[in-house]
Image (spheres, helix red, strand yellow):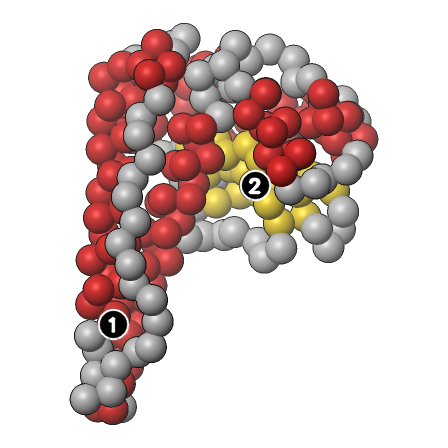
Amino acid sequence: MTTLAFNHEEIVARPLKPALLELDGISRQSVEAHYKLYEGYVSKRNEIMGRLAEVDIAAANQVFSEIRALKVDLSFALGGIKNHEIYFEHLGGDGGEPHGRIRDLIARDFSSIEAWRADLKATGMAGRGWAWTAFDWDEGKLFNYLGDAQNTFPVWNATPLVALDVYEHAYFIDYATDRASYIDAFFDNLDWDVVNDWVEQYQIRP
Ligand SMILES: [Fe+2]
């Protein structure tokens, strides 16, 4: 038996920040249910990595469909982890106008802060699952990208700095079908200090 050679150590979910239970306009009940989904993605990732490590690749044609299914599911689980870790990490703040380097970047790459916010909101209304403000290292600027699922459509060599979850599970408890009001609440709870820490960490320079 020949198995896929890679490290498949298990990872653990990041703890839920207490500040997330006191958001403005996004209820504790909603956040707790949402966090459970994130924990599920971590479990799924660990399970899939374990199963991949046990696939007998010497069986050639017989396992291609299995590898395909596992790797597609893995991309979904990993997206669910990465997207939610950004989402939960940068909520819990006071929203308002961005400041510091992220403000300078947004002002440079969009015509105004309001234009950026309007574009991200429109992208969030248009997407099925996600809208991200990401710094594209090849173009050297920010762009608001659209995502339908956890694994569609991230862009290579771009670093997400704002992750707006627009799956119904993010807002249905609080807003039913009123996604627009949820997006406004999302902006009201952004922690710009966290975003600026990422700008610093990744050495993104205006
Ligand atoms: Fe979510």
Label drawn at residue 53: 1
Picture mark count: 2
> Pointer 2: residues within 10 angstroms few (<14), some, or many (20+)?
many
> Pointer 1: residues within 10 angstroms few (<14), some, or many (20+)?
some
Q: Nearer the viewer, residue 51 or 151?
A: 51
Residue drawn at x 22%, y 43% is 40
Q: Are marks 1 and 2 in contact (CB under 8 Å)?
A: no
| Disc 2 residue type (three-letter) | Pro
Label drawn at residue 160: 2
Q: Nearer the viewer, residue 109 or 55?
A: 55
Q: Mark 1 to mark 2: distance in Å?
A: 30 Å
Q: Name the secondary structure under disc 2.
A: strand
Q: Relative to 50, is 163 on the left or the right? A: right
Q: Check the image and report above or below for 168 versus 65.
A: above
Position of the C terminus by quadrant: top right
Position of the N terminus by quadrant: bottom left
Tell me which label, 1 or 2, sits earlier in the chain.
1
Q: Name the secondary structure under disc 1.
A: helix
Q: Nearer the viewer, residue 8 or 42?
A: 8
Q: Relative to 182, is 28 on the left or the right? A: left
Residue drawn at x 29%, y 39% is 13
x and y, in percent, of residue 80 in the image? 35, 45
| Disc 1 residue type (three-letter) | Ala
Which image quadrant is residue 156 in? bottom right
Which image quadrant is residue 111 in? top right
Question: Mark 2 vs ligand 1: CB under 8 Å?
Answer: no
Q: Relative to 130, is 12 on the left or the right? A: left
